[in-house]
Amino acid sequence: MDLFTLLGIAMALAMDAFAVALGAGLILPRLTGRHLFRFGFHFGLFQALMPLLGWAAGRGLRSTIEAYDHWIAFALLAVIGVRMCQGALRQDAKNAAPKDPTRGWSLIMLSIATSIDALAVGLTLAMLGSPIFIPALIIGLVCAVLTLLGMFLGRKIGRNWGPRVEFAGGLLLFGIGLKILLEHTLLNG
């Protein structure tokens, strides 16, 4: 696989992570190096590990994973999105800060949800007999860079907007999950 094709695949795979990072940048009251590191590192790591797992799984699991990956991604993103919307509706507008999506289970769930498609790419590369380590590394690095870019852009847009921004971020996550679900069900059904 040539570098141009690989970069295109990596960019396409990173778009969900970019959108989620944009939403996170919108809701964080202050963007720190820790936020950037946690999101960029975890999203990049999961985006790099999923093709490796998919490649290792081989041909036997492809149809099973493809049949349910969109449901898993939708469920994870929808749960987090709904929780963010509920948190925004419950907040005292000036006293409570939005929940930090770069920590704990939210971070893990978002990392998995945004990288499930990379699992299918790994399966495809295994079926094509392509090597996996360089593609996985490039996919992870591109995702980490786009995640950081999304957080910076979200922060620029979202300064001082309070709970409305957290609610919008929750709707964005839910919308991304719904988009993934609709794309897979409409294209495959």
Image (cartoon, rainbow, N blue to C red):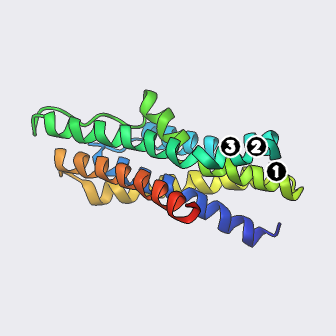
Pick the front one: 48 or 116: 116
Q: CA distance from mark 2 to mark 3?
A: 17 Å
Q: Earlier in the sequence, mark 2 or mark 1?
A: 2
For the residue pair 54 and 151, the one nearer the viewer reads as: 54
Q: Quadrant of the C terminus?
A: bottom right
Q: Which residue is the site of mark 2?
A: 52
Does residue 124 appear to the left or right of 129 in the view shown? Answer: left
Q: Which residue is mark 1?
A: 132
Where is the N terminus found, in terms of image quarters? bottom right
Residue at 29% x, 40% y is: 82
Which residue is drawn at the image coordinates 81% and 40% (left, top)? 56
Q: N-terminal of the two: label 3 or label 1?
A: 3
Q: Picture quarter containing residue 103?
A: top left
Of labels 2 and 3, the one closer to you = 3
Find out whether the residues at labels 2 and 1 contact each other: C-beta distance under 8 Å.
yes
What is the x, y in percent for residue 97?
A: 21, 35
